[in-house]
């Protein structure tokens, strides 16, 4: 075991080893730093090439959270240090984080993510990229980027576009939280277990007779998960029962009309009311670039998705809207951001287009061409 912020260990199995990475900064709800991303990437690459490693487990050392996202205050500091950019720490953080997310998406061996507690931002990027995505009775997933003038990155342009109906667009624009049952419905989760059953799963994986073939190894993990009956009931669905309303609110390509419909919605449902308020109080500029990003990447490859996210993320770091959003929510905590625009209609097309033009000095993404297995 090594590393203060990421614990690294391996477990001996019947005929192999299981790699185990634990995010270990409970005081920040395991928020990711650049060093943590580097540690995760390093060991994922080493274990991909190690024939003795048959699978990988990723979890968090906190009862409250798997991972609450990236360290946005560090990103804000980087943005403020060099207005207009280059914002060295922030931009290279994104490049390295997206590379790690991509590695997880294409990893040849099974990767089990234990998504207990808060799973947001960069934490969701890890969960969504893993082959086996366990959610629990206390899983709380959110994409709150519109509230701080960011966007659902870390592959959000990939997995949000693959959700049923307009669920992805709705979650991105409103910052609505979802639970484990919702995660299973929209594909962010693959299995539901109680948090207390994690050790049972680890024990089963260690006692398993592992095949040499990676496809068969994925089936082995499927079988181990299926053999464990959930020890608690799953929470009540929030997303599926509202899909007709969500699809109606989010229909079409006219963002001002969508915003108008959402803000005009009035009803007794608490979950939908919070979603409406998330869009109402969020950055209108962020809503515009979120909407455009999802539309432009709808048919994109995984490689194109991460390249486009790095372009957008780099430009956002070089603009003051993000720093203001983090100030209002997390630094001064006055929850009164001074957004540049009062409505999406007020955003000049040229301003929005500028966020989708790659700066000449942006960092390289350097996605791996292949992973040994």
Image (cartoon, rainbow, N blue to C red):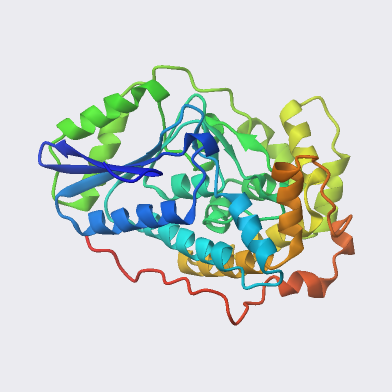
Task: From the top left corner, tell me how far across and down residue 12 is, in percent.
Answer: 15, 37
Task: From the top left corner, tell me how far across and down residue 64 is, in percent.
Answer: 51, 29
Taking the spot 27% from the left edge, 38% from the top edge, the residue there is: 221
When asked about the image quadrant of residue 133, the answer is top left
Taking the spot 68% from the left edge, 39% from the top edge, the residue there is: 176
Question: Residue farthest to the left?
Answer: 15
Is residue 209 in view? Answer: yes
Is residue 252 in view? Answer: no
In the image, is residue 339 above or below residue 6? below
211 or 14: nearer the viewer: 14
Task: From the top left corner, tell me how far across and down residue 348 is, in percent.
Answer: 85, 70
Question: Residue farthest to the top?
Answer: 232
Taking the spot 76% from the left edge, 59% from the top edge, the residue there is: 321
Identify the image quadrant of the C terminus: bottom left
Identify the image quadrant of the N terminus: top left
Q: Image check: 366 left or right of 77?
A: left
In the image, is residue 180 above or below residue 233? below
Q: Image check: 256 left or right of 145?
A: right
Task: From the top left corner, tell me how far across and down residue 8 is, in percent.
Answer: 29, 44
327 or 206: nearer the viewer: 327
84 or 373: nearer the viewer: 84
Q: Image check: 290 left or right of 365?
A: right
């Amino acid at each position: 075991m090594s590393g203060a912020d990421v614990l690294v260990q391996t477990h001996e199995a019947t005929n192999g080893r299981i790699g185990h990475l634990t995010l270990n900064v409970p005081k920040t709800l395991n928020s990711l730093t650049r060093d943590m991303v580097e540690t995760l990437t390093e060991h994922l690459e080493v274990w991909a090439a190690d024939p003795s490693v048959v699978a990988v487990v990723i979890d968090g050392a906190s009862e409250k959270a798997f991972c609450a996202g990236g360290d946005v205050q560090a990103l804000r500091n980087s943005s403020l240090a060099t207005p207009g950019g280059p914002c060295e720490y922030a931009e290279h953080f994104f490049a390295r984080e997206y590379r790690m997310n991509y590695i997880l998406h294409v990893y040849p061996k099974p990767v089990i993510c234990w998504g207990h507690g808060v799973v947001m931002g960069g934490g969701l990027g890890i969960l969504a990229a893993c082959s086996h995505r366990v959610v629990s009775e206390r899983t709380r997933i959110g994409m709150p980027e519109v509230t701080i003038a960011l966007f659902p990155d870390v592959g959000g342009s990939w997995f949000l576009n693959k959700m049923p109906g307009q669920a992805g667009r709705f979650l991105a624009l409103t910052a609505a939280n979802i639970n484990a049952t919702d995660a299973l419905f929209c594909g962010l989760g693959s299995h539901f277990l109680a948090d207390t059953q994690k050790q049972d799963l680890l024990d089963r994986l260690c006692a398993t007779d592992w095949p040499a073939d990676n496809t068969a190894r994925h089936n082995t993990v499927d079988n181990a998960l299926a053999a464990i009956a959930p020890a608690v009931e799953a929470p009540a669905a929030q997303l599926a029962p509202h899909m007709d309303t969500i699809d109606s609110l989010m229909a079409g390509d006219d963002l001002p009309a969508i915003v108008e419909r959402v803000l005009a919605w009035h009803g007794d449902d608490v979950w939908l009311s919070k979603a409406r308020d998330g869009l109402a109080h969020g950055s209108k500029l962020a809503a515009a670039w979120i909407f455009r990003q999802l539309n432009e990447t709808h048919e994109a490859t995984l490689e194109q998705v991460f390249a486009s996210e790095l372009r957008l993320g780099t430009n956002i770091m070089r603009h003051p809207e993000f720093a203001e959003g983090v100030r209002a929510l997390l630094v001064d905590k006055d929850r009164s951001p001074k957004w540049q625009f009062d409505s999406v209609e007020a955003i000049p097309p040229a301003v929005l287009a500028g966020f989708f033009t790659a700066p000449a000095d942006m960092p390289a993404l350097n996605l791996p061409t292949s992973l040994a297995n």
